[in-house]
Amino acid sequence: MQIVLPTTCFEPEIDGKSPENLTQQIISEMEKSFQHQSHKLSDFDLEEEENYFKALVDQEDEEENNSDISAAEEEDMHPKAKRLLGDTKHFCPVALKNHNVLHPCTDDIAARYRDRTFYFSSQEARDSFLQNPSHFVAHSEPLKPPALRIFMLGPRGSGKSSLSEELSQQLGLFHVQFIEMLQMMIVAKTKTRVSLVDEVVPWSDNFGDLEASIKKFSLGSEEQLEDRGSVQEVVKDLKREC
């Protein structure tokens, strides 16, 4: 009997590529036959797997009811069957690797690699994972979680900046003031700083406007006094004629 090994043809694109890049691409394709392969998981696959695990759990429950072994010993001998998740659990491994964020996912978009299930935030993320799954999983040590992100919210003068600076020093975090960053972006485009509603404007900024307002008010007061004096004279003349 002759054994036939399955073979696949690979046609590399040579346009615009150097011999070193072509060699590396061919070596990568040859090594894929000896590596763990990843594949997509459809809704049918996930449902079938869920039914399988449910049947295992039901079978274990029946064995527990019909056995005289203690619950602790039974749990050690027959652990509960459950789906094995990847290194990032219910978070997208591509988002963690490329953007250093924990993006929660559902089982709508999933893939299987090395007998473990990985969830993804989008179809594009899953396609990137399928092209090179070993790039997004842990090898010698666990994956590093992203830096802690804290958002401080509160009214002006409540001590947000002081507390944020103290936390950034204690935890080694990067402190950013959102309003100051926004002001920098506005000043770069408009060359003027936008004052807040409850922000106190310095006296020097409005001194010229205040002086003009005082002069205008004083001139209006003098005109009113002159008009008032003329009215009193007319009233006196009318009294004399009467």
Image (cartoon, helix red, strand yellow):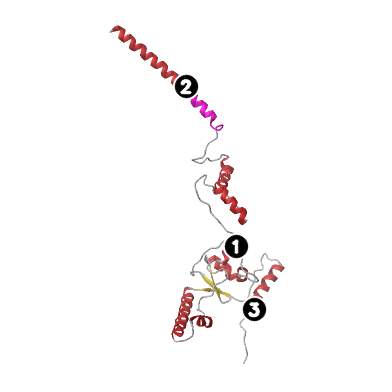
Q: Main secondary structure of the magenta part?
A: helix
Name the residue at 56% across, 50% down: 163
Q: Position of residue 69 (x, y in %)?
A: 49, 85
Identify the secondary structure beneath mark 2.
Answer: helix
Identify the secondary structure beneath mark 3.
Answer: helix
Identify the secondary structure beneath mark 1.
Answer: helix
Stretch in magenta? 203-219
Give the residue type at disc 3.
Answer: Phe
- Of badges 1 and 3, the one in the foreground is 1
- Of badges 2 and 1, the one in the foreground is 2
Q: Residue 218 — which label?
A: 2
The relative height of residue 50 versus residue 185 in the rendered view (above or below) is: below
Question: Mark 1 or mark 2, which is nearer the start of the sequence?
Answer: 1
Question: Mark 3 or mark 1, which is nearer the start of the sequence?
Answer: 3
- Horizontal side of 199 relative to 2 (left or right) equals left
Give the residue number, with chain letter if any, for mark 3: 34
Task: Look at the numbered discs 1 and 3 and tell me whether their residues touch, using CB distance below 8 Å.
Answer: no
- Of badges 3 and 2, the one in the foreground is 2
